[in-house]
Image (tube, rainbow, N blue to C red):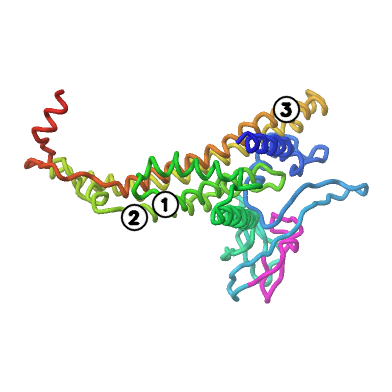
């Protein structure tokens, strides 16, 4: 266990040191005067946490004064009025204002605020109204391989390889070696501290696989979001909503007779109150519980990225008053300590989501004791033995 702890601590320290430079490697505004005010900083931060059709690592200005971008494109797949259309995102040439049009199958496409629109054949560029909403374009069904999709596929592959190796070691009844030594304590922790106490001794094994999957999936994605590659998968509402829907489906389908009875026709309360409670319980089961899961994860991860990027922006906004060296040093120190907290938050949010999922599932599969008699109003009537034991 000491070897595992030392190994894991070294990895964590190296990861923190690397992630503290996250914003510096992905920061596009490296040119003098490119970020000059709060509006530009806010716009860049919001752009940074959004999903994208390509990987943008960093930018620089060459000796001829031309702005160069370093990264690599991803496939763009859209369903248009003429069917499926594919091309590489590099054809937009890093344009996000609808000025560069891509022609395919007699159609023209423009990218505006990271969204792809289909324009008329006669259009030369995207046209906007006073509120900067596109006027001559229609949204298409975007099935592109974006950064978030790449992150999901990458984490899925890593989990498949890691847990397959761990399962083979367990199957051979051998002590886990290599990275399996790091995974084993976390697997046992999720099983014994999250699944078993919240779901119960009889049924926790049935749902442990899902809880392990969602825990490691969220945790690794949260850590991946702190790397210089600019992932923000768990900061996307679509991803957190999908995870919450999975939990919703599991505890809804697994709910036993007692669970639905307490939702639809609550025992132990007056009959006239039961329909009102049924509405409240249904809203809680299908709206409030999933909403709390998706919003908590989305808000905390997005807020962490915004704070880190805001601290990095100090070197642009305060360089006139503190100097380039002073502003950069202050920005680096503050972002480093916030990154320490973000590493903890990455684990904490995965733990909270998994814990709440286990709690909701446990409430749905819990078995209730209905052996006691009830009075005319549905209240439980204790027998003489219960009264005697409570009195003693």
Circle on res. 207: 1
Q: Position of residue 198 (x, y in %)?
A: 38, 41
Report the mark closest to the observer, 2 or 1: 1
* Residue at the farthest right position: 63
Tell whether label 1 touches label 2 (CB within 8 Å). yes
Residue designated by label 2: 254
Residue designated by label 3: 333
> Which residue: 41% across, 51% down?
205
User: Dot 3 surroundings within 10 Å: few (below 14), some, or many (20 or more)?
Assistant: some
User: Dot 1 surroundings within 10 Å: few (below 14), some, or many (20 or more)?
Assistant: some
- Would you place residue 171 above or below residue 41 in this image? below
Horizontal side of residue 279 vs 384, given as left or right: right
Range drawn in magenta: 85-109
Report the mark closest to the observer, 3 or 1: 1
Name the quadrant of the N terminus: top right
Name the quadrant of the C terminus: top left
Report the mark closest to the observer, 3 or 2: 2
Earlier in the chain: of badge 3 and badge 1, it is: 1
> Which residue: 83% across, 46% down?
60
Tell whether label 2 touches label 3 (CB within 8 Å). no
Per the model, the C-alpha gap separating discs 2 and 1 is 10 Å
Earlier in the chain: of badge 2 and badge 1, it is: 1
């Amino acid at each position: 266990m000491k070897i595992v702890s030392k190994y894991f601590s070294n990895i964590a320290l190296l990861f923190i040191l690397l992630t503290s430079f996250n914003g510096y490697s992905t920061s596009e505004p490296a040119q003098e005067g490119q970020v000059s005010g709060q509006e530009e900083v806010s716009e860049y931060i919001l752009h940074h946490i959004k999903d994208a059709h390509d990987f943008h690592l960093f930018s620089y200005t060459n000796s001829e004064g031309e702005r160069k971008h370093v990264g690599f494109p991803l496939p763009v797949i859209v369903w248009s009025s003429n069917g499926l259309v594919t091309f590489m995102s590099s054809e937009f040439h890093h344009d996000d204002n609808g000025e560069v049009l891509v022609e395919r199958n007699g159609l023209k496409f423009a990218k505006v605020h990271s969204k792809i629109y289909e324009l008329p054949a006669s259009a030369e560029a995207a046209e906007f109204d006073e509120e900067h909403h596109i006027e001559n374009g229609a949204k298409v069904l975007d099935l592109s391989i974006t950064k978030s999709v790449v992150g999901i596929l990458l984490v899925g592959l890593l989990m498949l390889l890691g847990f397959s190796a761990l399962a083979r070691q367990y199957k051979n009844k051998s002590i886990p070696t290599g990275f399996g030594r790091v995974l084993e304590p976390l697997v046992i922790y999720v099983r014994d501290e999250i699944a078993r106490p919240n779901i119960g001794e009889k049924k926790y094994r049935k749902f442990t696989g899902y809880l392990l999957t969602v825990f490691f999936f969220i945790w690794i994605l949260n850590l991946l979001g702190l790397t210089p590659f600019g992932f923000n998968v768990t900061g996307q509402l679509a991803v957190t909503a999908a995870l919450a829907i999975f939990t919703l489906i599991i505890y809804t389908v697994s709910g036993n007779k007692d669970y639905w009875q307490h939702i639809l026709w609550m025992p132990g309360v007056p009959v006239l109150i039961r329909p009102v409670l049924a509405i409240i319980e249904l809203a809680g089961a299908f709206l409030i519980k999933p909403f709390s899961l998706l919003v908590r994860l989305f808000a905390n991860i997005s807020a962490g990225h915004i704070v880190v990027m805001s601290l990095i922006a100090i070197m642009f906004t305060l360089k006139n008053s503190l100097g380039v060296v002073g502003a950069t040093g202050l920005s680096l120190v503050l972002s480093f300590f916030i990154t320490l907290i973000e590493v903890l938050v990455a684990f904490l949010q995965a733990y909270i989501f998994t814990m709440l999922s286990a709690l909701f599932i446990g409430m749905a599969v819990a078995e209730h004791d209905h052996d006691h008699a009830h009075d005319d109003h549905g209240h439980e009537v204790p027998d003489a033995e219960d009264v005697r034991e409570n009195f003693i």
